[in-house]
Image (cartoon, rainbow, N blue to C red):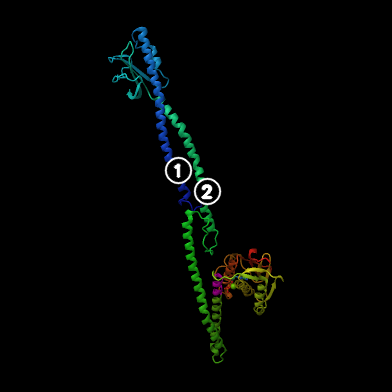
Amino acid sequence: MTVPTETHRGKSSLARALLGWLLIPLFFLLAVSAYTTYRNAYHLAQTERDLVLEEITDDLKELVSDELESKGKIDPGALAFSLLIQDARDTRYFAIYDASGALLAGNPRLVRTEAGDGSTKRAAFDNISLNGKRLRRAVLHGALAELPGFEIQVAETMVRRNRLTLHLLRGVLVPQIVVLALSIPLILFGVNRGLHSLEALRRRITHRSAQDLDAIPVDNAPRELLPVVTALNDLLSRFKAVQEEQRRFIADAAHQIKTPLAVLTAELDLALADPACPCARPTYERVQTAVSRLAHLVSQLLALAHSEAIAGQTHALFDLAELAREVTGDFVAAAARKRIDLGFEGPEQAIPLQGNAVLVREAMKNLLENALKFTPEGGTVTASAQAFPPVFSVADSGPGIPEAELPLIFRRFHRAAESSTTEGSGLGLAIVQEVARRHGATVVAGKSELGGALFELRFDDGTVSQP
Ligand SMILES: Nc1ncnc2c1ncn2[C@@H]1O[C@H](COP(=O)(O)OP(=O)(O)OP(=O)(O)O)[C@@H](O)[C@H]1O
Ligand SMILES: [Mg+2]
């Protein structure tokens, strides 16, 4: 994934949301596991410790029996009792009652319970409260030869039980928490890997040129992204239709304007040739200049609309060297009028190129037009064509293009401040760039060895059709 930038900060993150939605159930499962583990651990600790309590009741019974057998009575202060019940962690209490309910030994606060029916030889357990402490108590009923009915109680505090429960709980929960903590970066890694296709789609859209309105291929898009890609493609196709409509409108409007302009030019020529009204001549001449500028603008607009037309593009094999020589030849007369030395350098053999010769001619025409227009009288302009890679270039000895202007000159209707004295609509280089784009070529402006500007129309080797 990309590193979040300033603009991304504060925006909701899909990766974080997915991580959140994965962690919430995981934490819930951890809580359920903690609860069940606690229940099991508590139960296990109770069972274990109850067995110990039961053993002590049995031992007390043995002790009572031995006492009665040897001495005929029970000594409540016998050391053996306190030794039997003592423990390092828990406090233990005991009580021994006879059948009449008289306390024979032990703590009277362990109140006698309801005497059992003696059917079971095992101790019964319950929880009691003594001196504000919670105790677990084992009660054993039975009969001895010397003691026909007795009740032995042993109760202990919960320290060992609680420690054992906690120990068991920790043994299970700590590894689970560690695994969950370790799984967070792994989940994040997995989520990010899963979102890779989203990143790939973003990259594909970002790297598109603004003119590329073709549909985004859906074959590699994951199913979840399909609705987004389809909606985007739908938008692109609608946008393309609107753009095409606009382009057609400009082309139609320019075409419609051409006819009345031609009529106007013809009428002006007639009026200028009429010797009857010489006083109107300066006005007619000014109108003629304005009309020819308008005609140039219209033809540039048409050329631009034509170069941008998506449909009806015919790509065929043509000879770049031959085309360049021919177009340069068309400008010989114009160059001569300005006493500019127009030359051409190109190979004898053909430079085969796959493309639209009409559009490439338009681009060459504009570059040559510019060179002749901006180069002062007596200057030099050299057009050249070369193969491997195929390049058409125009160098001139004119004023050149200031560094700061270079990024701007390809904009539509942009004209450098220095060019304000020359005629032009600022569309020529936009046409050249559009033609270049249509051919996968690039147009580069720089400084020529002649001292002026240098324009290179560099075609990709792939456009060349190898013999
Ligand atoms: N050979 C050149 N020498 C100096 N400046 C140039 C040259 N070619 C282009 N420029 C600069 O780039 C600007 C844009 O050129 P572009 O061809 O787009 O427009 P234009 O020539 O002014 O008008 P149009 O071509 O539509 O008649 C020009 O106005 C000029 O400032
Ligand atoms: Mg121009």
Secondary structure under the numbered disc 1 in the rendered image: helix
* Residue 56 falls in image quadrant: top left
Magenta-drawn segment: 300-308
Secondary structure under the numbered disc 2 in the rendered image: helix
Q: Is residue 235 above or below residue 140?
A: below
- Camera-side residue of 151 and 442: 151
**Relative image position of residue 25 (x, y in whole percent):** 43, 42
**Relative image position of residue 324 (x, y in whole percent):** 66, 72
Q: Is residue 81 above or below residue 238?
A: above
In the image, 252: left or right of 71? right
Q: Which labelled disc corresponds to residue 193?
A: 2
**Which of the two discs, 1 and 2, labels the residue nearer the N terminus?**
1
- Camera-side residue of 452 and 252: 252
Q: Residue at x 38, y 25 (%)?
A: 158
Amino acid type at circle 2 is Arg
Q: Is residue 456 above or below residue 218?
A: below
User: Given the current orientation, which residue lies at the most extreme bottom position?
Assistant: 276
